[in-house]
Image (spheres, rainbow, N blue to C red):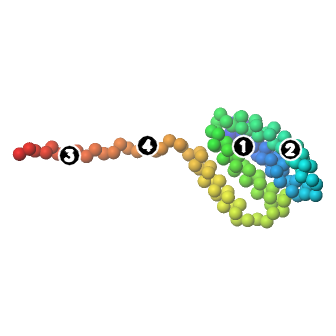
Amino acid sequence: MNTIVKTIVLLVISNTFMTFAWYAHLKNLGHKPWVVAAMVSWSIALFEYLFQVPANRIGYGALSLPQLKIIQEVITLTVFIPFALIYMRQTWSWNYVWAALCLMGAVFFVFRDPRPAKLPPPAVAVQAPVSSR
């Protein structure tokens, strides 16, 4: 399997655990003290890190650090939207689309060639010699 594909698959799994660790307690443990929610969230977050750390180690050679971060953000939004709509029963908003478009812009800029385009050398104007009369 391609290194970048492995990285993305592991990050999707990691972000799924992360999303549940960060937000599922709002629905399931709202009646419990925050300490209980924190302990449950930390337990879920352990699984997040078991996938996230290898994902970043595998991807770091093939991708730059900014590229890894932007991929992670895109995956986070990709995982979060279905979670919010299906699991948390949030209502649809076009703001999800606008946020995704902003992230697509971030992907464009972080993956484009960082070197400036080479311009041809400027044309040198040839001047006729000035006669001295």
Which of labels 2 and 4 is toward the front? 2
**Residue where numbered disc 3 is placed:** 127
Task: Determine if residue 2 is in view.
Answer: no
- The image quarter in which residue 88 lies: bottom right
Could you tell me which secondary element the residue under label 1 belongs to? helix
**Residue where numbered disc 1 is placed:** 8
Is 129 rendered above or below residue 89? above
Could you tell me which secondary element the residue under label 2 belongs to? helix
Residue at 67% over, 36% down: 60
**Residue where numbered disc 4 is placed:** 118
Alpha-carbon span between mark 2 and mark 1: 23 Å
Is 29 rendered above or below residue 119? below
Tell me residue 133's x, y (percent): 5, 45
Alpha-carbon span between mark 4 and mark 3: 27 Å
Alpha-carbon span between mark 2 and mark 4: 50 Å
Is 69 rendered above or below residue 84? above
Tell me residue 58's x, y (percent): 71, 35
Q: Earlier in the sequence, mark 4 or mark 3?
A: 4
Alpha-carbon span between mark 1 and mark 3: 60 Å
Q: Earlier in the sequence, mark 1 or mark 4?
A: 1
Q: Mark 2 is on which residue type? A: Trp
**Residue where numbered disc 2 is placed:** 42
Residue at 71% over, 46% down: 72
Alpha-carbon span between mark 1 and mark 4: 33 Å
Could you tell me which secondary element the residue under label 4 belongs to? loop
Crowding near the residue tagged with mark 2, few <14, some 14–19, many ≥20 C-alpha atoms within 10 Å: some
Q: Are marks 1 and 3 in contact (CB under 8 Å)?
A: no
Task: Determine if residue 79 is in view.
Answer: yes
Q: Are marks 4 and 3 in contact (CB under 8 Å)?
A: no
Q: Mark 1 is on which residue type? A: Ile
Residue at 64% over, 36% down: 62
